[in-house]
Image (spheres, rainbow, N blue to C red):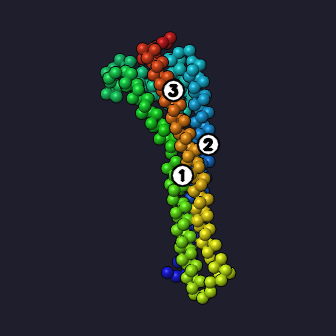
Amino acid sequence: MSEFASSHIVNLTLWLLIGFSVLAWAIILMKTIEQWRLKAANRAYSTAFWGAPSLAAARDLSSLQGPLARIAKTGFDVLEETHADNAPRLAASGDRQDTLERSLRQRIQQERHEIEKGLTILASIGSTAPFIGLFGTVWGIMHALKDISKAGSASLDVVAGPIGEALIATAIGIASAIPAVLAYNYFLRRVKLEEADLENFATDFLHLALKTGFSLKKGG
């Protein structure tokens, strides 16, 4: 392989790693903003929901958004369907408590999938970037050794430059991987905490529905 082709492969590896780093930081910024918004939305809805005088009054909090609001809306929709005058759909058939539990659980899983978006990319960058950098380093060293062989000298001046340039790929690979791995672990923990909060809210919603006899009548 020609000198140009070898150098081109190493440069391509470096640019790929730089692209990985930019993508990782973009996802980190996006997820940070997303987490802040979700936390604020959940806090606002939780305050409004528990401040409502009844479950029926809480149903009217449709202007608020966020995961908790969507879970509550799912629960309210199920309660309304099970009390509809027309024949119930298959999705609303069966025991009311089982139907409500199933719907809330499905909604929680959907919310988790939304919150997890982007984490797979961070995990992939964190696991592959060091190996891509190592590939670039090995390829660069092979190319450097060929040049050294052609020069017929193994002095420090001849070896240090090419080998040092080749090691840059490994350094960039590690530099790309570390933030991605740290961010992935942090956001994964946040996902678990968010899911726990959603499950707690869904459990409380179910208990409220049981207390009111699965009714949304005013005063119920």
| Residue in the picture at 32% in, 24% down | 93
**Residue 159 pos. (x, y %):** 63, 79
Q: Are marks 1 and 3 in contact (CB under 8 Å)?
A: no
Mark 3 or mark 1, which is nearer the start of the sequence?
A: 1
How many marks can you see? 3
* In the image, residue 155 above or below residue 29: below
Which kind of residue does numbered mark 2 sit on?
A: Ile
Which of the labelled discs sits on residue 33, or is there none?
A: 2
Residue 215: in sight, yes or no?
no
Q: Provide the secondary structure element on which disc 3 rests.
A: helix
**Residue 185 pos. (x, y %):** 55, 46
Residue 195: in sight, yes or no?
yes
Mark 2 or mark 1, which is nearer the start of the sequence?
A: 2
* In the image, residue 42 above or below residue 208: below
| Residue in the picture at 62% in, 86% down | 153
* In the image, residue 40 above or below residue 93: below
Which of the labelled discs sits on residue 201, or is there none?
A: 3
Left-right relation of 91 to 19: left
Q: Provide the secondary structure element on which disc 2 rests.
A: helix
Which kind of residue does numbered mark 1 sit on?
A: Leu
**Residue 39 pos. (x, y %):** 60, 34
Q: Provide the secondary structure element on which disc 1 rests.
A: helix
Which kind of residue does numbered mark 3 sit on?
A: Phe
Which of the labelled discs sits on residue 49, or is there none?
A: none
Q: Real-space Cα distance between discs 3 and 2?
A: 23 Å
Residue indicated by mark 1: 122
| Circle 1 crowding by C-alpha within 10 Å: few under 14, some 14–19, many from 20 | many
Q: Real-space Cα distance between discs 1 and 2?
A: 16 Å
Q: Are marks 1 and 2 in contact (CB under 8 Å)?
A: no
**Residue 218 pos. (x, y %):** 49, 12
